Amino acid sequence: MAALSILAQISDPHIVVGPGDAARSDALAAVVRDLVGLAAPPDAVLVSGDITDDGDPRAYERARQLLAPLPMPVHVLPGNHDVRDALRASFPVGGRGGPGAPVRYAVECGALRLVVCDTTQPGRDDGRLDEASLEWLAAELAADPETPTIVAMHHPPLLTGIAAMDAIGLPAADRAALAEIVTRSPQVRRITVGHAHRTAFGLLGACPVVICPGTNMRVRFEPEASEIAVEPGPPAFALHVLLPGGDVVTHMQAAGPE
């Protein structure tokens, strides 16, 4: 069988410094331990936002230490709880931009191409894909229309059915604009995101959207609740696997006991 290209995904560890850190750090460490022990090592690991809970530089350093055992490249993007400049100070991030600039870049992960698009709005929980972001993404995808591609962002470009979560997602106009871009970019095999703290799947046009669960906190499925309800959840991660024929299959896997 031909070699597989594998992109692992971790999301929403929400690392903090001080009280409350142990459970979050232990969960991230468990996921890292399982990724290191996989029989087929991933070509790279994506961390799809909310690396810290409050943007504290010390929390980014703690996250960096917890991710350090991973021998493969680690690619990060910001979530609504992150601070772009503090994230950049602890993690190598591709692309260009001055202080506070959106985090946007593309990298090769084996035979996969990963295109990272920043959906965050500093100081806000809801996301946006503004005109500049959409133009950048369209140009980046047009630059390589052949390589199987995964587009990564933090906020889901679809509705989850959980009203309080959807209220801090992406607006309908931005979802529609993104759908137009991926419709004319058939090399995009997946859009993969975090933010919702649940395993969920949907379609944006004809493109599959995968929501990766958080590493230790799960949002309860309460469709009409006025506030997001969070409970402990098992550490988990995603594996996006490029098959020899060019298709991508996504596996969700809970981290095992130590």
Image (tube, rainbow, N blue to C red):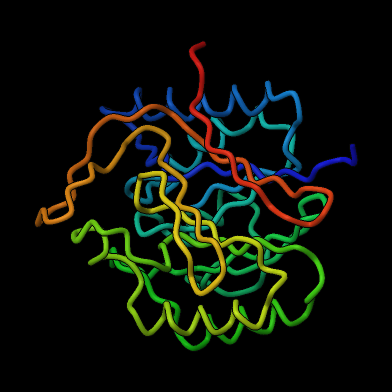
Within the image, what quadrant is residue 223 found in? bottom left
In this rendering, position of residue 140 left or right of residue 66: right
Task: Give the residue furthest to the top.
Answer: 258
Q: Residue furthest right?
A: 2
User: Residue at the spot x=33%, y=45% of the render?
Assistant: 53
Q: How many marks?
A: 0
What residue lies at 54% left-to-right and 30% top-to-bottom?
A: 66
Q: Position of residue 184 (x, y in %)?
A: 65, 83
Nearer to us in this view, 210 or 151: 210
Judged left or right of residue 52, residue 75 is right
Give how far across and how far down residue 218 sits, in percent.
Answer: 30, 38
Tell me where residue 23 sits by quadrant: top left
Please, is residue 5 above or below residue 88 in the view?
above
Q: Residue at x 60, y 23 (%)?
A: 34
Where is residue 94 drawn, in percent x and y?
68, 63
Q: Is residue 47 left or right of residue 44?
A: left
Q: Where the N terminus falls, by quadrant?
A: top right
In the displayed image of the protein, which residue is found farthest to the left? 226
Classify 208 as above or below 145: above
Q: Residue at x 51, y 79 (%)?
A: 179
Query: Is residue 112 placed above or below 188 in the rendered structure?
Result: above
Horizontal and vertical percent for residue 155? 41, 62
